[in-house]
Image (cartoon, coloured by chain):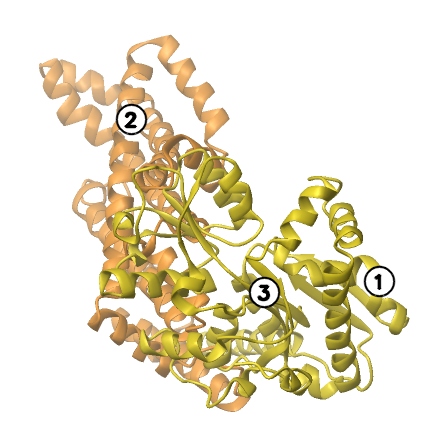
Chain colours: A orange, B yellow
Amino acid sequence: MATRSVAVSTRRPREARLRWGRLPAWLRFSLLLAALIALWQAYVSIEQPDELLFASPLAVAEAFVDGWRDGTLARATWTTVQVLALGIGIGALIAVVLTVFATLTKIGEDMLSLLTAILNPLPGVAVLPLALLWFGLNTNALLFVIANATIWPIAINVSTGFRTVNPTLVAVGRNIGLSSRRLVTDVLVPAGLPHAISGLKTAWAFGWRTVIAAELVFGVSGADGGLGFFINNAKLYLQIPQVFAGLVMIAILGVVFETLFGVLERRTIVRWGMKTS
Amino acid sequence: MKRITLVLGLAAAVAVAVLAAAALAAPRGGGGPPDKLTIAYQPGIGYAPLIVIKQQRLIEKRYPGTEVEWKVLASGAAITDGVIKGDIHVGAGGVGPMLVGWARGVNWKFLAPMNDGDLWLMAKDPNIRTIADLQGKRIAMPSPTSIQAMVLRKMAQVKLGDARALDRGIISMDHPDAMQALISGQIDAHLTSAPFQFQEKVRGAHVVAKSYTYFGAHSFLGVMVTQKFYDDHPAFSKALYADVVKAIDLIKTKPDAVAKILQEDAGGFPTQRQFKQWITNPALSYTTRPRGLMRFAAFMNRIGVISKVPASWRELVFPPVYPTKGS
C-alpha cells in the first residue's frame, strides 16, 4: 500500500514532492492520522457534543486502555478473530473441494457456477435468521454464516485462477519434462496464486463484515461475545467511549490484516513479477 | 502545495459533515403542548395504561393540535436511543434502562410509573428447579440492562454468592421471540413479565423464581420523559400523568371494557376473556406509586452497573408523582 503511494506521488508536481512526497511513508500516514485526531478533538472541544452521542479521542483512548487492562476488549477481540479464522478456514476448505470438482469435471464446473450465481450475492447476515433456527443461538450459527460468506469469493477466484493459467506455461512445463505432481505444485498453483490471494482478501473482507454484523444482531451471550457484542453492550450501558474503542479496535485489525496480505503478496506474486506494486 | 490544500480541503469537508449531522440531531424547543409527539413502548400487558390512552385518543381529545405517533419497540435500549437522539419524546420502559440512563446523564425521570410487576424466571426443562441449576444455561431477557437482568443478578448474588455468576448466559431477545425460543427448547430459561410468563406456564414451562422474592413488591414499568421535555411542556406533562391515572382507574373499575380495548389494539387475538385474566392477575398491579426504586438503584450501584445513587426516590420521578408516597 505504502509503496504504491510513492509511485503515485512521483507523478505529482515537483514542489509538492519536495515538501510531502519526500517524507517517509510512515511519517506521512502518521501526520495525516494525527491531523484527523486533532480535528476530532477540536470538534469535541469547540462544539461540545452530548457525551451520550459522541466521545472525545481522549476518552476513547482511555476506554481503549481500560478495555485492554481489564481484559474485556482483549477477550472480545480474541473471540471474534477466533470465530472468523475458523469460519474462513471452513469456508476455504469447502471452496477448495468445490474448485477441485469444478476443475476435474464439467458437471462440477457448472454446479459451481450455478451455486456461486445463487449464493454469492446473498449478504452474509441475510442467512443469519435461518442459521439461528438450524444451529441455535451459539457459535455454530456464526460459523455457518461466515463460511457461507467466504466460500463463494474464494471458489470463484481459485477456479478462475486455475482456468486462466497461460497454456504456454503448462506446455513449457511439460516440455522440460515435469512430472504431473510438479506441474501442479510448480506451475499451476503459483500461476493461480494471484487469484487465490485476491479471493482470500475478498473472503476476509466479507467474513469480517459478516461476523461483526452478526454479533451486533445477536450477541450470542454474555462474556463469550465478540467485538460486535462488545460494541452493542457498551451502547446498552451508554458507555459511548467504549463503543468508539471497539470501532478503533476493528480499524486496527483491518490495518493489521491489510498489512499481512501486503507482506504475503510481496513475498510471492510481487516477487515473481505477477503483480506490480 | 496542491496536495496539502487537498488534504486541508478534505479535512474541512469532514468537519462540515460532522457539524451538520450534529445540528440535525439537535432537539428543538417549544412552549405549550408539542406539535408532534412520539410515544414509544414495548410489547406486553404492562403497557396497558398507554394502550388505553392510545385507543381512547385521550391526548388528541385534550390537545387537538398535537400529532401523536405511537411506536412499539422491542427493547428498552431502543427506546433509550430514541430519547437520547430526540426522536422519541415519551418513552415507556422498565426500571433497569431508566436507572442506567439516569446514571449516565440521560436527563430523564419517570413522569408516571405504571405498575408493580412480579417478574418470573421460567424454564421448561423439569431438571431446572433452582437458581443453581441455571449455571451455564442460556437465559433470555430483553437486554443486559433490562430490569430482568438486574433481577437475575440479584438472584445470582443471593443464591450463588456472585451477582455476575449467570451473566455469561444472558441472551438479549424480546419477549415474544424468547417465548417461542423457550417453548421450542432453543434457550433454557426466560426471565420475563406478564403476559408472557402466564402464556409460558400454560404452554408447559414452570416458574423457577420470582422477582418479588428478592426485591419485595417493586415498580416494573413507567412512562419517562426528559427534564427538558417536562420544562418545555409542564401543563402537557401533568395532563399526561393524569391520563395515566385515568387509564389505570379504568383498568381497575372496568376490566371488561379495557380487555376489549386491548384486544382491539392487538388485532383481535387473543380473546377478551384472556386479556381480562391477564390484567386482573395479581402478578401485575397497576399504580402510579413507585416502589423499590431505591432498592434497585442501590443494588445496581453495588454491582457496578450504575456509578451513582439518587439521594431519594424523588430524584427519579417528576413532581406529579410526589404525592403518591412512593419508595
Callout 1 amino acid: Arg
Task: Tell me where residue B123 sits by quadrant.
Answer: top left
The residue at 79%/85% (across/down) is: B235
Report whether B208 appears left or right of B27: left
Instruction: Kindly identify which chain the residue marked by label 1 belongs to.
Output: B
Helix, strand or loop status at disc 3: helix
Q: Position of residue A11 (x, y in %)?
A: 40, 63
Helix, strand or loop status at disc 2: helix
Helix, strand or loop status at disc 1: loop
Q: Which residue is mark 2?
A: A94
Q: Position of residue B295 (x, y in %)?
A: 42, 77
**A158 versus A70 height, above or below:** above
Q: What is the spatial separation of the Cα atoms under label 3 and label 2, in whole angstroms?
A: 43 Å
Q: Which residue is mark 1?
A: B57
The residue at 26%/65% (across/down) is: A72
- Mark 2 against mark 1, which lies toward the viewer? 1
**A96 versus A261 height, above or below:** above
Between B80 and B277, which is closer to the camera in this rendering?
B277
- Mark 1 against mark 3, which lies toward the viewer? 1
Q: Are marks 1 and 3 in contact (CB under 8 Å)?
A: no
Q: Are marks 2 and 1 on the same chain?
A: no
- Mark 3 against mark 2, which lies toward the viewer? 3
Q: What is the spatial separation of the Cα atoms under label 1 and label 3, in whole angstroms?
A: 22 Å
Report whether A39 appears left or right of B317: left
Task: Tell me where residue B309 sits by quadrant.
Answer: bottom left
The residue at 38%/15% (across/down) is: A109
Q: Position of residue B226 (x, y in %)?
A: 63, 80
Callout 3 amino acid: Ile
Residue A24 visible in the current orientation: no
Instruction: Point out which mark residue B79 bears.
Output: 3
